[in-house]
Amino acid sequence: MIQTIQQYLQFPFVRYALVVGTLIALCSSLLGVTLVLKRFSFIGDGLSHVAFGAMAIAGVLQITNDMLFVMPVTVLCAILLLRTGRNARIKGDAAIAMISVGALAIGYLLLNLFSTSSNLSGDVCSTLFGSTSILTLTKAEVWLCAALSVIVVVLFVLFYNKIFAVTFDEDFSRAVGTQVEAYNLLIAVVIAVIIVLAMNLVGSLLISALIIFPALSAMRVFRSFMSVTVCSAVLSVFCALTGMLISIVGGTPVGSTIVAVDIVMFFVFAGIERFCRGGKRL
């Protein structure tokens, strides 16, 4: 198996996939803890479906670099979702459901009406589940993903204290003068960027798992926000690399394999929690 992996690593597209997959997994895990604690876990689902709809529109309009269209649309919808979620008549979960289902339905409808592809089912499956698209990245796309990933990590590190405060107590943060709305907006925009990046890795239907599972697993064992975030990042990168290597060697779908590894690790951490239940959490 090791020899097989070494042979595959000689190909540039495999190395590109591993680098981008690692960066995306790292970025996804950083804000996953925040989303879980703010009970906004399904924002990943909603924005991923928006990204699918935007990608369908880009395909119909024959836009060569669809990320230049998908990224702004997803960011705009993240802002809209944040604003709509505060509406007294439309709560956060209802707003996510409206945008999620609407974007997914419109995207699939447009693909059926205007698509020029001879393999529509294959294209849709690849977009939804990320079957092999991670292995078709160009060098330019790799550099773009790397640059955006670095920006996400830098923003998280710079505003870590503010994100921590907003995550646990918005009212207190607002009382001490923190611009809560601005930091919530920053979180929404960063999540939108991560969603667009992750579509090539796990597809639009599995993005939530990439964001949420490492955070939930880390929370089974660790207590503090910092330790949960660090463990989540390490675990997410490990699961992504393991899933991609298994996928490359075994010929399984990339996104589904990564999520399967995440599920296994969740049960492993749940077992660790059960074993250590008599003592203190770390």
Image (cartoon, rainbow, N blue to C red):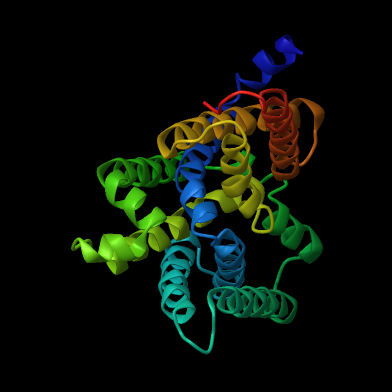
Given residues 31 and 11, the one toward you in this image is 31
Looking at the rendering, in which quadrant would you find the N terminus? top right
Please indicate whether residue 236 sits to the left or right of residue 38 in the image. right
Q: Is residue 35 above or below residue 14?
A: below
Q: Position of residue 184 (x, y in %)?
A: 36, 63
Inspect this view and state whether residue 17 appears. no
Residue 278 in view of the camera: yes
Front position in the image: 261 or 121: 261
Q: Residue 129, position in %: x, y?
A: 72, 53
Across and down, in percent, residue 271 comes to: 74, 28
What percent of the width, then of the height, locates residue 231?
Answer: 51, 30
Query: Which residue is painted at 53% across and 74% down in the image?
Result: 92
Left or right of residue 46: residue 249 = right
User: Residue farthest to the top?
Assistant: 3
Q: In terms of depth relative to the viewer, which is nearer, 280 or 183?
A: 280
Q: Toward which corner of the image does residue 119 lie, by quadrant?
A: bottom right
Picture quarter containing residue 270? top right
* Relative horizontal placement of residue 34, taking residue 152 as reference (left or right): right
